[in-house]
Amino acid sequence: MQRKRSPFRPPAGRNDAQPDGNRARPKRQEVDGNRIAPDGKPRPGGRRGKSARHAVPHAEPQKLHKMLAQAGLGSRRELEEWILAGRVSVNGKPAHVGQRIGPQDRVRVNGRPVNLKFGPRTPRVLIYHKQEGEIVSRDDPEGRPSVFDKLPRIGGGRWVNVGRLDFNTEGLLIFTSNGELANRLMHPRYELEREYAVRIVGELSEAQEDALLEGIELEDGAAHFNSLFARGGEGTNRWYHVTLNEGRNREVRRLFEAIGVQVSRLIRVRFGPVSLPPRLKRGMVTELAEEEVRALMKALPPAGKGETSGNRL
């Protein structure tokens, strides 16, 4: 059986030369008339892997909402709201925001006991190839198919999605058992680059390419692509690959609509250092091996305070 290559791609020092950790907008490069990203294409591949996780008790108590987030019950912000709403108890008493707990404390959420691991353990990370016509939500009044229906069960917690894709967008979705890791991947301060394959009818003019790269004023502020590559096509359809560092609602589609171009298909192929494996078919899921998860966590900056997640594209 042929071994698949990892979808994890460590960032090759893209921010090292920038002051204060800020990434400068890359200089335009051209090959055969195409605007290209300095880093080239993402590496393909992917594999599934699991290994045992061992818990070692901490010597000091830990913050309650942090431990619940690490258990995959939600983001820190969500869990603070749960605590304020009285949904969390410690040793039979209502919990309070900022409370610290230890291995000996009994924690319940909505009256049910929660098994918390007081020790370093590697989070689980899933890669899912979202199909068009699925929602990234557990509850939908219209009863539409949910991506969560395709994920494996996880004991003692829940899968936390890293960002969203709208109903008509396909491609890479990342899920993790650890709310802290999800927050580090999503938060706008880190500006993790997203890459999309975009299909349109017709071909972009040079003026349209310039506008998309230099910036367009949208209703929620100016936006632009970091890079834009022509990727060929058949008939009247043309494919382009674009990259950007934001996660505003439908931003890719709105940028093209602003220059009078309608997007007929949109696929996310990369989120930060994680690429969509070519062999992962639509509607399929795979799990990163433990060493790949550790490499991903090492490549990310540490989480800050008061961070919240981003929006859908």
Image (cartoon, rainbow, N blue to C red):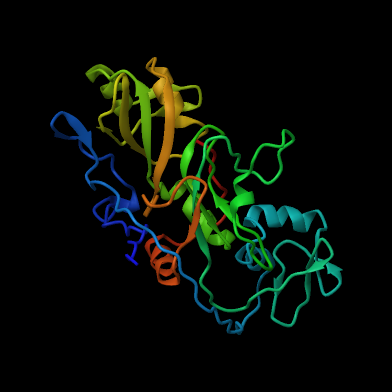
Q: Is residue 153 left or right of residue 52?
A: right
Using the rendered view, name the quadrant where residue 203 is placed. top left
- From the viewer's perspective, tell me whether residue 89 is left or right of residue 138: right
Residue drawn at point x = 42 percent, y = 69 percent: 294
Please name the residue shown 46% across and 31% down the image. Answer: 251
Question: Is 299 left, or right, of 93 in this rendering?
Answer: left
**Residue furthest front as drawn:** 1
Choose between 287 and 123: the one closer to the eye. 287
> Can residue 306 be seen at all in this image of the molecule?
no
Q: Is residue 90 left or right of residue 46?
A: right
The image quadrant of residue 72 is bottom right
The answer to whether 199 is drawn above or below residue 202 in the figure is below
Residue 47 visible here: yes
Across and down, in percent, residue 110 comes to 82, 60
The image shows residue 114 at horizontal and vertical percentages of 74, 70
Q: Going 31% across and 35% down the picture, which residue do you hit?
A: 241
* x and y, in percent, of residue 307 in the image: 55, 51
| Number of residue marks | 0
**Farthest residue, direction top:** 260
Rendered position, 165 above or below 69: above
- Image quadrant where one finds the N terminus: bottom left
**Which residue is farthest right?**
92
> What x and y, as percent, mark residue 292?
40, 67
Q: Is residue 254 above or below residue 6?
A: above
Please name whichever residue, 209 or 6, is drawn nearer the observer in this view of the structure.
6
